[in-house]
Image: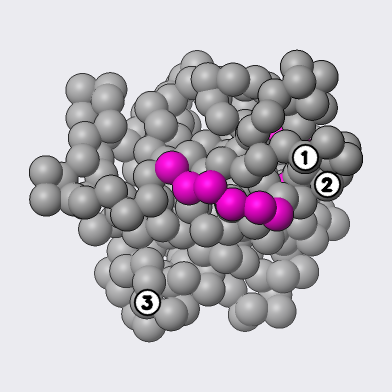
Amino acid sequence: MSSSRRIAILASGAGSNMAAIAQACEQAVIPASIGLIISNVPNAGVLGRAKDLRLPHCCIDHRQFENREAFEDAMLLKLRGASIDFVVLAGFMRILTDCFIREYYGSLLNIHPSLLPKYPGLNTHQRALDAGDRETGATVHYVIPELDAGPTIVQGKVPILPEDDAESLAARVQVQEHAIYPQAVRWCLEKKVELRDGKVWKDPSFMDDGETRTGANANNGTRA
Ligand code: GRF
């Protein structure tokens, strides 16, 4: 489906969230098209998947740049060139500067593999296990300059089972990610959810059809 809204997805890993969002665009569940996929990792799985799906993609290797700003300038150039108006971070393992965030503020989402505000940062699944938590999950939030601290749009919860390790938990959480991330992008693009005065605003007519989901059956965030 073609749409005037154009999404970019920034990813560093396997790209399963990218694929879930791309599928939702393809099926017109999300009223937008994928305008560009950028990875900072030359051999990342996400680039192979983008190629297989015939989606526009490129690699911008952060190691080729002198500093964070120069790397981001290169990305911004590509994003502007592709007329991108909404940016989705899907396992993108670079911290973004205020300058980049300002450019897409309110149209910039991230997914984090924990029930924020619990466990911002790294090794979220192991930390949930070590703490003896009985549930964990994933959070989709607007991106603000403070890492993993932006206002929450939706969370997906999963139980932690006695036999779980970080890997099994990650896999179970990722199933939730693939459900809640396309949903959150859809809400934002339909303007049912907006970032207003630093808070999540929801359309008054917007009935909660799963702001917090629970499910059974991910990968850990490691942004540098
Ligand atoms: C996801 O689990 C996300 O929560 C974390 O990185 C992972 C990316 O996985 N930030 P994928 O590349 O989308 O498969």
Q: Is residue 134 left or right of residue 64?
A: left
Decide: is 209 above or below 220.
Answer: below
Residue 214 falls inside the magenta stretch: yes
Q: Which quadrant, please, contains the N terminus?
A: bottom left
Q: Is residue 140 visible?
A: no
Kind of residue sitting beneath label 3: Ala
The magenta stretch spans which residues?
212-221
Counting other residues with Cα less than 10 Å from the Cα at mark 1, is it few (<14), some (14-19), or many (20 or more)?
some
Kind of residue sitting beneath label 1: Leu
Counting other residues with Cα less than 10 Å from the Cα at mark 3, is it few (<14), some (14-19), or many (20 or more)?
some
CA gap between label 3 and label 1 equals: 36 Å
Residue 195 or residue 37, whichever sits in front: 195
Residue 159 x, y percent position in the rendering:
66, 40
Kind of residue sitting beneath label 2: Ser
Decide: is 199 above or below 191.
Answer: above
Q: Is residue 208 visible?
A: yes
Q: Mark 1 and mark 2 in contact (Cβ < 8 Å)?
A: yes
- Res 114 → quadrant: top right
Question: Which tag, 2 or 3, sits closer to the chain's start?
Answer: 3
Residue 47 falls inside the magenta stretch: no
From the image, tell me which residue sits under label 3: 28
Residue shown at the point (11%, 50%) measured from the top left: 205
From the image, tell me which residue sits under label 2: 168
Residue 154 x, y percent position in the rendering:
42, 41
Residue mark closest to the camera, 2 vs 1: 1
Residue 64 or residue 212, whichever sits in front: 212
Counting other residues with Cα less than 10 Å from the Cα at mark 2, is it few (<14), some (14-19), or many (20 or more)?
some
Q: Is residue 111 left or right of residue 174?
A: left
Report the magenta stretch's main SS. loop
